[in-house]
Amino acid sequence: MSPFEFITIFCSLILGLALTHIFGAVSDLYEIRKRVKTFWLNSLWVGTVIMWAIYQWWGLWELSINLIEWTYVQYWFLVTNLASIYFFTTLVLPKATDEGIIDLEAHYYSVHKAFFSIVAFSLFSSAAVNYSLFGEPLIGAMTIMPSIVGCAAIGAAFTDSRTYHKVIGIFIFAMFIAFQFTDNIVITYDV
C-alpha cells in the first residue's frame, strides 16, 4: 500500500460520509415533500456543498503526484479541513420529521451562524492545506481566493441580512463553478 493510498482511505471515508449524509437528507426530505416548504437559497447551498465535497475528493489526486513524504501535521491539516466539510454538510438540511411542516428558510437562518463559521474555517484551512501540502504560494490564487471567500463567510455568520445571504450564496456557488472550470488535474492510468 502506498503512502497516498494509506492517507486517502481515511480522507475518502470522511468525504464519503459527508456525501452520504447530504444525499440521504435530500432523499428523506423528498419523500415528505408535501410537508417541506422549500427555499431557493437553501437548495443552492445543498448544490454548493455537494460540489465542494466532490471537488475536494477530486483534488486529493494531486497528492499522489506531488507529495512523497507526509508528516502528521500535514495529515492533521488535511483531516481537519475535510472534517469541516462533513460538519457543515450535516447542518445544511434539517432532519426529516414524522409530522409538521419543515421550513427550509427557517432552518437556514436558524443554523447560519454555525454553518458559516464552519464554512469560513474550512476555507481558511483550505488555504493552509494548499500552502503546506500542495506547495501553493502563500499569496496566490489557491490561497488568496479561499481566504477572500472565507472572510465573506464570516460576514454571513455575523449578519442576519437576507440580502447579504442571497449575494454570498450566489457568490460562493459561482466561485466553486469557477474553481471547477479552472481545474487542470488529469488522472491517468499507467499500464
Image: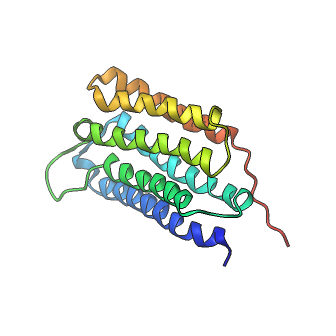
Seen in the picture, residue 150 relative to 87 is either above or below; the reply is: above
Percent of width and height locating residue 116: 35, 38
Seen in the picture, residue 148 relative to 3 is either above or below; the reply is: above
Percent of width and height locating residue 59: 63, 52
Percent of width and height locating residue 124: 48, 40
Seen in the picture, residue 183 relative to 156 is either above or below; the reply is: below
Instruction: Using the image as rendered, state which of residue 104 and residue 129 is in the foreground.
Output: 129
Instruction: Using the image as rendered, state which of residue 94 and residue 75 is in the foreground.
Output: 75
Percent of width and height locating residue 128: 54, 44
Q: How is the image coloured?
A: rainbow
Figure quadrant of residue 27: bottom left
In this image, 168 relative to 100: left or right? right
Specify the quadrant that holds the C terminus.
bottom right
Figure quadrant of residue 24: bottom left
Instruction: Using the image as rendered, state which of residue 14 and residue 26 is in the foreground.
Output: 14
Specify the quadrant that holds the N terminus.
bottom right
The residue located at (63%, 31%) in the rendering is: 139
The residue located at (67%, 64%) in the rendering is: 69
In this image, 102 relative to 153: left or right? left
In this image, 100 relative to 63: left or right? left
- Outermost residue toward the left? 100
The residue located at (43%, 64%) in the rendering is: 17
Instruction: Using the image as rendered, state which of residue 168 and residue 118 is in the foreground.
Output: 118
The residue located at (57%, 32%) in the rendering is: 145
- Outermost residue toward the bottom? 1
Q: How many marks?
A: 0
